[in-house]
Amino acid sequence: MIEARFHDSIERIPAAAWDALRPDDNPFVSHAFLALLERTGCIRQDWGWQAHHLGLYEDDTLIAAAPLYLKGNSHGEFVFDWSWASAWERAGGDYYPKLLNAVPYSPVPGPRLLAGRDAHTAGRQHALATAMRTFAERMNLSSVHANFLRDDELAAFDGPWLSRSDVQFHWHNRGYADFADFLGALNHKKRKNIRQERAHVAQAGLSISMEAGNALDTHDWRQIHALYEATFDAKGNHAALTRDMFLGLGDALGDRVQLALARHDNRIIAMALFLQSSDTLYGRYWGAEADVPGLHFELCYYQGIEHAIRRGLQRFEPGAQGEHKLARGFLPVRTHSRHHLVNQSFRDAVHQALLSEAAAMDEYAQDLLQHSPYAHTTST
């Protein structure tokens, strides 16, 4: 007998049981990362987030799980459904709360259906997706969404689920010996531009370093969070990650947290924050108090590429959006989400809109590949 249970905190699920179900070491679905978000005030109902994690149990043993949230808005998701919400509410319905299978504030492809790695994995993934849909229908929610899925999870979302995709820009390690070797793979114009950007930073007299999160002290982390917060505020955006969350990152994740730092007179004046797994570097946040030409590209991209080459990482995913990444060695890849809208008529209308969106996205992705920065055509 398999039973679906929902939990209002990740802490109600033992860390060892949760992590044993992860198919890889993607840090964003680790118990430590999700618990840190909750413990430090980043997951709050008044900000639109309420933990509602799903566990499948057999004889009280956890056999599958999914990070799940009841959402009171669509902030912090990066798969935009504002137009769907508006249409449903104009029709007299309540779009929120909805159910979301995702990692908060993290447009990072990775596991969303944690079901181990054995002959039963596919069946358990399907059972998780079905449990989400059943819950949404039973509770009269408008919808359930699963964002930034792995390719091997897509089959679990069959039947009434709607498909959606987008484009991100990722860097792939082709066995480069060093950064110069990587530059050598680019065409002349792109190679020249990158060298010029790096030269501007070198002339600014800053100390640039890549440092592990557990090597930094509390004072460093306070400076780093202040840069993150100020950068969000300057753009009129909400800085959702609290100072306590930043202060706890090094202890929670150790050297899986990496930071590219720019110092002037021993003061951190700019930073880019990364998380990493055994094969992938993930770029997340940037902040700066000085306007130095090329510094954003240096910390957010070039330091990350150098780090990935040194560590033998296979991929570097610097975050959502940004066609400017193409000129710096990042190629387009597709990301995937699945959506179940409970009302049949609403679902049919959105399905038609998604067909047009998918055709436009296919055309956009193909056009991007025609502008590869590499001297010879490279595909992912």
Image (tube, rainbow, N blue to C red):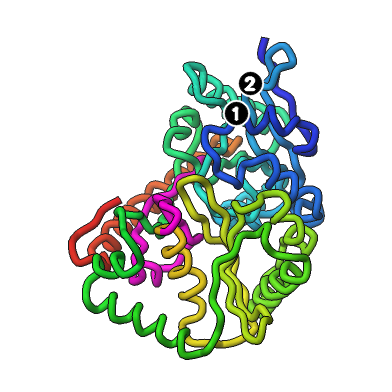
Range of magenta residues: 310-338
Q: Which residue is mark 2?
A: 63
292 up-or-down from 131: above or below: below
Identify which amino acid the numbered label 2 is placed on: Ile
Residue occupying the far left of the picture: 376
> Looking at the figure, which quarter contains the N terminus?
top right
295 up-or-down from 247: above or below: below
Front in this rendered view, residue 212 or 185: 212
In which image quadrant can residue 325 be found?
Answer: bottom left
Q: Give the image location of residue 197, x and y in percent.
A: 40, 82
Is residue 345 visible in the rendered image? The answer is: no
The residues bearing labels 2 and 1 have C-alpha atoms spaced at a distance of 7 Å
In which image quadrant can residue 287 be found?
Answer: bottom right
Question: Which residue occupies 27% across, 68% down?
Answer: 373
Crowd around label 1: few <14 · some 14–19 · many ≥20 (10 Å) = many
Front in this rendered view, residue 312 or 296: 312
Q: Secondary structure at mark 2?
A: strand
Sequence order check: which comes first, mark 2 or mark 1? 1
Q: Which residue is mark 1?
A: 21
Q: Are marks 2 and 1 in contact (CB under 8 Å)?
A: yes
Q: Is residue 323 magenta?
A: yes
Question: Which residue occupies 19% across, 67% down?
Answer: 375
Identify which amino acid the numbered label 1 is placed on: Leu
Q: Secondary structure at mark 1?
A: loop
Q: Give the image location of residue 362, x and y in percent.
A: 32, 53
186 up-or-down from 341: above or below: below
Crowd around label 2: few <14 · some 14–19 · many ≥20 (10 Å) = many
